[in-house]
Image (cartoon, rainbow, N blue to C red):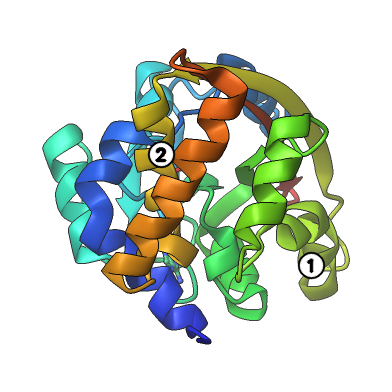
């Protein structure tokens, strides 16, 4: 069964509560790196968080003193964000057609979502809404395939829609659209330790599983439970991640 990119991109809405409860956040070092590559602190910055989802990537920027506006196309995800972060303005919109005037933000961020946009549209849109001297920062949590159990899981799951290519090529994709910009990249390793049930519930919120018929998704998750019990027994699961960050600054 081939599922369209649009269907995959919209799949999060049906699982938004589980997404909010179980997906990983991002380490503090990621936000340090965003500040470094943006050349300014988050404190006092006007930030547009594109594809903000339930606000997992948004909350730490608020905590650092940024004024964050969220752009999120999905109704289910936007509703979760409003529940989690009631003070954040949420505007329903796509990264491909941002509903904001030019020169509105110091920083445009996109956590785990830029692969759903069309760079030919989302790069010019981000550059349009940024002020001179602003920055665009894109990042993803990628499961660390150098760890044996992750490599085995990736082989079992055979993801239909792989983010990895975009996460590695984000800088090139930006330069294809805006050749004068110089992207900078960082990779940061981190991990979180969660109960097996949380790991499995988080896995089930991924688009390639959330779009399966319910019985097939349930069978896949139960097969993963069995495979991971062989590795972790009844203990918690340590999920290793590489955060891939790409950032560009616009001319001052
Ligand atoms: C994997 S979630 C990431 C959510 C959040 N940023 C995070 O870090 O957890 C991907 C999000 O991208 C949103 N999305 C899908 N298509 C999009 C588009 N064209 N522009 C912006 N966001 C989009 C989805 O609705 C979803 O909320």
The spot of residue 27 in percent (x, y) is 56, 20
Residue indicated by mark 1: 173
**Side of 102 relative to 36 (left or right):** left
Local crowd size for mark 1, using a 10 Å CA cut-off: few (<14), some (14–19), many (≥20)? some
The spot of residue 159 in percent (x, y) is 62, 63
User: Quarter for ligand 1?
Assistant: bottom left
Quick check: can you spot residue 71? Answer: yes
* Picture layout, residue 143 above or below residue 196: below
Q: In the structure shown, which secondary structural element does the residue marked by tag 2 occupy?
A: helix
Q: Nearer the viewer, mark 2 or mark 1?
A: 2
Quick check: can you spot residue 99? Answer: no
Q: Please give the count of numbered marks on the rendered protein.
A: 2
**Side of 28 relative to 152 (left or right):** left
The residue under the point 63% across, 25% down is 30
Residue 47: image quadrant is top left
Q: Where, quadrant-wise, is the C terminus in this rendering? A: top right
Residue 67: image quadrant is top left
The spot of residue 56 in percent (x, y) is 38, 35
**Inter-mark Cα distance, 2 to 1:** 32 Å
The spot of residue 217 in percent (x, y) is 37, 62
Seen from the viewer's position, the closer of residues 249 and 114 is: 114
Seen from the viewer's position, the closer of residues 222 and 138 is: 222
Seen from the viewer's position, the closer of residues 9 and 238 is: 238
Q: In the structure shown, which secondary structural element does the residue marked by tag 1 occupy?
A: helix
The residue under the point 43% across, 19% down is 194
Residue indicated by mark 2: 200
The residue under the point 45% across, 38% down is 225
Label at residue 104: none
Q: Earlier in the sequence, mark 2 or mark 1?
A: 1
* Picture layout, residue 163 above or below residue 178: above
């Amino acid at each position: 069964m081939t599922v369209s990119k649009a269907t995959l991109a919209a799949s999060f809405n049906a699982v938004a509560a589980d997404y909010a409860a179980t997906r990983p956040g991002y380490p503090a070092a990621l936000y340090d790196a965003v500040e470094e590559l943006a050349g300014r602190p988050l404190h006092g910055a006007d930030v547009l968080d594109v594809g903000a989802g339930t606000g997992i990537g948004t909350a730490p920027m608020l905590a650092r003193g940024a004024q964050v506006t969220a752009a999120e196309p999905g109704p289910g995800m936007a509703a979760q964000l409003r529940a989690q972060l009631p003070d954040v303005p949420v505007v329903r919109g796509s990264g491909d057609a941002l509903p904001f005037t030019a020169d509105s933000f110091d920083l445009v961020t996109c956590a785990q979502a830029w692969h759903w946009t069309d760079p030919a549209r989302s790069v010019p849109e981000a550059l349009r809404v940024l002020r001179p001297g602003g920055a665009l920062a894109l990042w993803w949590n990628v499961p660390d395939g150098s760890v044996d159990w992750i490599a085995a899981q990736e082989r079992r799951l055979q993801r239909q829609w792989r983010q990895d290519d975009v996460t590695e090529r984000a800088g090139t994709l930006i330069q294809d659209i805006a050749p004068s910009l110089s992207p900078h990249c960082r990779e940061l390793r981190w991990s979180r330790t969660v109960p097996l049930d949380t790991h499995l519930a988080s896995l089930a919120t991924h688009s390639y599983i959330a779009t399966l018929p319910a019985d097939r998704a349930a069978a896949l998750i139960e097969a993963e439970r069995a495979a991971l019990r062989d590795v972790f027994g009844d203990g918690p699961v340590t999920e290793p991640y590489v955060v891939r960050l790409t950032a560009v600054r616009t001319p001052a």
